[in-house]
């Protein structure tokens, strides 16, 4: 079960570690996994349960996540060994990176729609653009939030393509906003969060000349013709059955999906994408965002010229969810500062959090540990290393030692130490990441102008 098919495509991957990683990522019993890019809704509005224990939709992820079942339910595909090989060849051809990203090799980005079409286009020397986004619900972003952006940065490096990043301040206001009869509403708060989060996103180091980041509140006017076309093409029945809206939902919630769909079409970015209306679009994101893009693909032909190579359908690359620090018991949350590692954490805070709070599959005593070894399936420090330790051989060694209770990494202390070092260096790099403007067109949006100003300040 699980996503064994996805993981088994790594033929060059040592079988031993491969099996452990399969277990780690596919069978983990995560009671409540916060999805990697944001927080949950009010819990009342969600799509159907998928199977008995699993709920995955754009606003809620809970229960034991069975990725195989999820992919089947959504109708997406697993990335096959052949497809991965093809992607590897295409990437080597561009000559810009040498290897596939570890998250592709390790089955973290594990599922897709029409990825072979992107390969085909690249093989023919045709361009495409990348689209991803973030719902700004908290000021501080944590590691889980950053995953899709780190991966998108790699994709941009590998393919040298334009990127658009949507900050859905509108979405978060509609789902989480408040109104107070004294103070009014807090829409401005979400616009502020969009700005704050954009700075963290920019620090991933995207190519400034090819990246356009925008807030919906600021940029919607430019996309409005396409939003209208989408509204006209999608029935309320479809929106309701896909997203689970109820009669008591505010009407903005029903309107919002079109706003997340619109950036899938190049004509939403006349200036940043230079009127190239036939560009194909690739969207890297966590798999809970699929419902938006499933609908998008069904109506896509209405929003592009007839000779668009994919008839307007965006391609998708899906990742799994990032496990919270407390493992199977807890949930990663921006409001509980001990449940996640934040981009603002100091080296000492990182050390403290991992040492104190990372759920371990290790044993109580050294003696027991050396006999039984660790349970890699539930061990958070090991799971996190599979995300952030780039060195395949070292990861293999840790998996072997730790699961057997022998060698350099026989116990939890050593494994945690390794993770602490990896995270400290990653967060340090991020904090040093220069915060500059990344706007193709600073003319088209106030948001971008503000970021340009911010970049100018940061550069001093
Ligand atoms: N809805 C996403 C969130 O809550 C934000 C988002 C907007 C997004 N557009 C996207 C995520 C495109 C991935 C791809 O975080």
Image: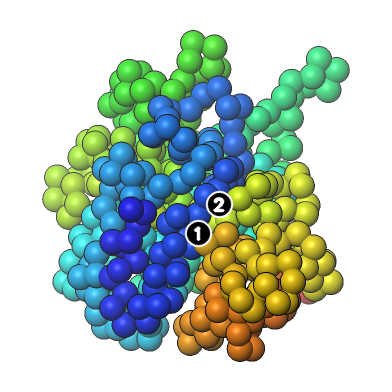
Q: Work out whether residue 331 or residue 43 is closer to the camera in this orientation and state it.
A: 331
Viewer-nearest residue: 177 or 25: 25
Q: Nearer the viewer, mark 2 or mark 1?
A: 2
**Which residue in the structure is indicated by mark 2?**
36
Furthest residue in direction top, as rendered: 247
Residue 285 image point, x, y percent? 44, 53
> Measuring 22% from the left and 73% from the top, which residue is drawn there?
86
Quarter of image, res 375: bottom right
Q: Secondary structure at mark 2?
A: loop
| Cβ–Cβ under 8 Å for marks 2 and 1 | yes
Going 65% across and 47% down the picture, which residue do you hit? 329
Instruction: Say above or below: 75 vs 163.
Output: above
Mark 2: few, some, or many residues within 10 Å (few <14, many ≥20)?
many
Which residue lies at the image location 49% right of the left edge and 11% below the top edge? 247
* x, y percent for residue 54: 46, 37
Q: Position of residue 43 (x, y in %)?
A: 58, 27
Residue with the mark numbered 1: 148
Residue for point 43% across, 43% down: 289
Label 1 neighbour load within 10 Å: few <14, some 14-19, many 20+:
many
Q: Position of residue 18 (x, y in %)?
A: 39, 73
Task: Specify whether tag 1 is near ligand 1 (CB below 8 Å).
Answer: yes
Left or right, residue 131 beside residue 235? right
Residue toward you, 18 or 125: 18
Q: CA distance from mark 2 to mark 1?
A: 8 Å
222 in relation to 453, above or below? above
Q: Is residue 14 visible?
A: yes
* Above/below status of 81 relative to 295: below
* Element class at badge 1: helix
């Amino acid at each position: 079960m699980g996503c064994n098919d996805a993981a088994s495509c790594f033929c060059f991957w040592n079988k031993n570690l491969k099996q452990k990683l399969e277990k780690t990522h596919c069978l983990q019993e995560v009671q409540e996994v916060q999805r990697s890019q944001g927080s949950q809704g009010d819990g009342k509005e969600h799509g159907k349960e998928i199977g008995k224990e699993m709920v995955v939709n754009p606003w809620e992820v809970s229960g034991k996540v069975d990725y195989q079942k999820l992919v089947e339910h959504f109708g997406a595909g697993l990335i096959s060994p052949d497809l991965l090989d093809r992607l590897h060849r295409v990437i080597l051809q561009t000559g810009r990176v040498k290897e596939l990203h570890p998250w592709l090799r390790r089955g973290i980005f594990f599922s897709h729609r029409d990825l072979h079409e992107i390969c085909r286009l690249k093989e023919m020397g045709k361009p495409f653009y990348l689209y991803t986004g973030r719902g700004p619900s908290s000021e501080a972003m944590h590691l889980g939030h950053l995953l899709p952006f780190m991966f998108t940065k790699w994709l941009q490096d590998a393919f040298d393509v334009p990127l658009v990043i949507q900050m859905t301040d509108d979405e978060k206001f509609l789902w989480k906003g408040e109104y107070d009869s004294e103070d009014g509403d807090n829409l401005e708060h979400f616009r502020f969060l969009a700005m704050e989060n954009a700075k963290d996103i920019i620090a991933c180091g995207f190519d400034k000349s090819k990246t356009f980041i925008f807030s919906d509140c600021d940029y919607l006017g430019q996309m409005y013709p396409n939003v209208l076309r989408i509204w006209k093409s999608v029935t309320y029945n479809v929106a309701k059955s896909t997203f689970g809206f109820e009669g008591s939902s505010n009407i903005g919630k029903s309107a919002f999906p079109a706003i997340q769909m619109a950036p899938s079409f190049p004509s939403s970015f006349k200036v940043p994408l230079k009127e190239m209306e036939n560009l194909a679009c690739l969207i890297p994101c966590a798999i809970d965002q699929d419902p938006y893009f499933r609908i998008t693909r069904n109506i896509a032909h209405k929003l592009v010229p007839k000779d668009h190579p994919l008839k307007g359908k965006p391609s998708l690359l899906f990742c799994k969810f990032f496990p919270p620090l407390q493992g199977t018991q807890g949930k990663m949350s921006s409001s509980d500062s001990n449940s996640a590692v934040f981009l603002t954490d100091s080296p000492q805070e990182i050390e403290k959090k991992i040492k104190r709070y990372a759920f371990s599959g290790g044993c109580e005593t050294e003696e027991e540990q050396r006999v039984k070894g660790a349970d890699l399936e539930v061990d958070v420090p090991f799971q996190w290393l599979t995300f952030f330790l780039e060195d395949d051989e070292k990861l293999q060694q840790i998996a072997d030692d730790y699961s057997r209770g022998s060698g350099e990494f026989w116990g939890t202390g050593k494994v945690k130490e390794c993770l602490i070092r990896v995270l400290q260096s990653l967060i340090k790099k991020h904090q040093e990441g220069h915060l500059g403007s990344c706007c193709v067109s600073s003319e088209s949006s106030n948001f971008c102008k503000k970021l340009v100003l911010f970049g100018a300040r940061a550069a001093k």
